[in-house]
Amino acid sequence: MDMTLLYWHWIVIGIVLMLAEIFVGSFFILWFGAAAVVIGVVLVVFPGVTTGIQVLSWGLLSTGFAIGWFRFLKPLSTDKTKAGLSRETLLGEIGQVLSPPNGEKRGTVRFPAPVLGSDEWQIISQDSLNPGDRVSVVDVSGNSLIVTKA
């Protein structure tokens, strides 16, 4: 049986593989699909390429795309910031009470150096606090810090 792959076969295979990536989420199948689309476009320009060369080229191109992604492009997209680590950044910080919490009213604490862009924060505490007391951050509740006496 003689099998002939036409340019549109490769383009359809490529699109199906790229759509499958939506459900897999590994960002790996995408490169097999991209290689298939490239082979389809090459076949538009050079329609006489044999099926064996097409499949071999697709395999090499897929491997090259995948290696290129994991070796060169993916490391550029890693997040090296500390965004989203606010809770971990605040825990254990020591500050001085400016105004103690009173009933439903939240108090205020000042840190010696700005923490996450601010040196004054609202606080909640179960301890009886006075202005000037040193407190340690034990948790975060919304935009307020939960503190205990240090």
Image (cartoon, rainbow, N blue to C red):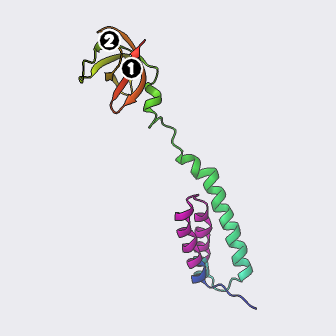
Taking the magenta stretch, the answer to whether it contains residue 21 is yes
The 10 Å Cα crowd at callout 1, few under 14, some 14 to 19, many 20 or more, is many
Residue shown at 66% from the left, 66% from the top: 62
Q: Which secondary structure class fits the magenta region best?
A: helix
Task: Please indicate whether residue 117 sits to the left or right of residue 30 in the image.
Answer: left
Percent across and percent down for residue 40 are 59, 78
- Which quadrant would residue 136 be assigned to in this image? top left
Q: Quadrant of the C terminus?
A: top left
- Residue on which the image places disc 2: 129
What residue is at 44 percent from the left and 19 percent from the top?
93
What amino acid type should be assigned to the residue bearing mark 1? Val
Element carrying mark 1: strand
Q: Position of residue 10 (x, y in %)?
A: 60, 78
Instruction: Say which residue label 1 marks.
Output: 147
Find out whether the residues at labels 2 and 1 contact each other: C-beta distance under 8 Å: yes
The residue type indicated by label 2 comes to Leu
Residue 33 vertical position relative to residue 139 in the rendered view, above or below:
below
Vertical side of 132 occupied by 83: above or below: below
Q: Is residue 57 left or right of residue 87?
A: right
**Residue located at (43% from left, 25% from top):** 90
Measure how far apart labels 2 and 1 are at the Cα level.
Answer: 10 Å
Q: Which residues are magenta?
A: 11-39
Q: Which of these two is toward me, 90 or 119? A: 90
The secondary structure type at the circle numbered 2 is loop
